[in-house]
Amino acid sequence: MPSALEQLSRILAIPMKKTDTRLVKHLSMQEIQAILDAPRPVDWAGIRDRALLHLCFAGGLRVSELVGLRLADVTLQPHPSIVVHGKGRKERCLPLWKQTSTALRSWLAVRGQTHTPEVFVNARREPMSRAGFEYILDKYVHVASQSCPSLAGKRVSPHVLRHTCALTMLEATKDIRKVSLWLGHAHMQTTEMYTRADPSIRLEALNATTAPNLRSGRFRASDKLIASLTTRSVMRSKNPAQ
């Protein structure tokens, strides 16, 4: 209503509250490799868990995208890829590393016939849940911490794997647009947070500029300074307790 326009304009004029902008949490390549190596692919569960972890990291997938992946979304020939159903019903097609496709092939070979269209199922042959995957991830982070002590005490969520994938791609490509497309971000501004956490971006900027010259010179001790240091040395020799 016109009578409320003045009040509305005052409300809109209130500045937004500033919040702290923190760096995204991510893992080193040594840490992520230790987690990926934690499952023992010698049985049904181990083969499944290895494929789960590899695909989550390599695809930079959200948990909903990972557990919602369907058999119809997987292509293994001629070029391995998956179709990911992201937020806002947006789809994206991601190629797979050879290692990831190998892990996925091994899982599909032992998965067995079920009426469930999802790729990953639990021990009851039902669709894998978000909580189920988080439990699996926590278990293998604990296992990996025995060979990689830096993981001990860290809270590694599925989104930390997504962040690690994003930073790995940004470091390799130096192209924020490619990272945005890979992760399925609706806005480029969302992807920009990774540029604050990637030191190689700033290192490139540093190497591209010419540093100011450093004034040369030589330190010369004055007679007064030498006398002062000599006096202190004599006093300490006389009083060792000082």
Image: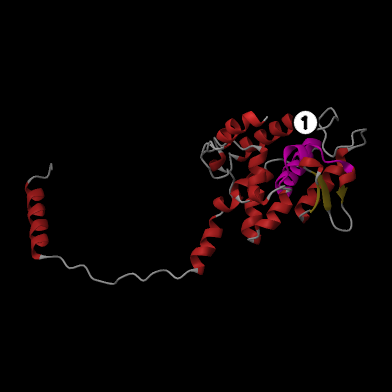
Viewer can see residue 42: no
The residue at the far front in this view is: 3
Give residue 153's quadrant in the image: top right
Binning the other alpha carbons within 10 Å of mark 1 as few (below 14), some (14 to 19) or many (20 upward) gives some
- Which residues fall within the magenta stretch? 44-71
Quarter of the image where the N terminus is located: top right
In x, y percent, where is residue 198? 56, 54
Considering the numbered disc 1 on the image, is that residue within a helix, a strand or a loop? loop
Q: Is residue 3 above or below residue 234?
A: above
Quarter of the image where the C terminus is located: top left
Where does label 1 land, which residue?
129
3 with respect to 102 (left or right): left
Q: Is residue 47 magenta?
A: yes
124 with respect to 166 (left or right): right
Give the colour scheme of this rendering: secondary structure
Q: Is residue 21 above or below residue 199?
A: above
Magenta segment main secondary structure: helix
Residue at 52% across, 59% down: 202
Q: Amino acid at mark 1?
A: Ser
In x, y percent, where is residue 158? 67, 39
In x, y percent, where is residue 25? 58, 43
68 with respect to 141 (left or right): right
Residue at 87% across, 52% down: 76
Q: Is residue 200 above or below residue 147?
A: below
Residue at 23% across, 70% down: 218
Query: Viewer-proximal residue, 18 or 13?
Result: 13
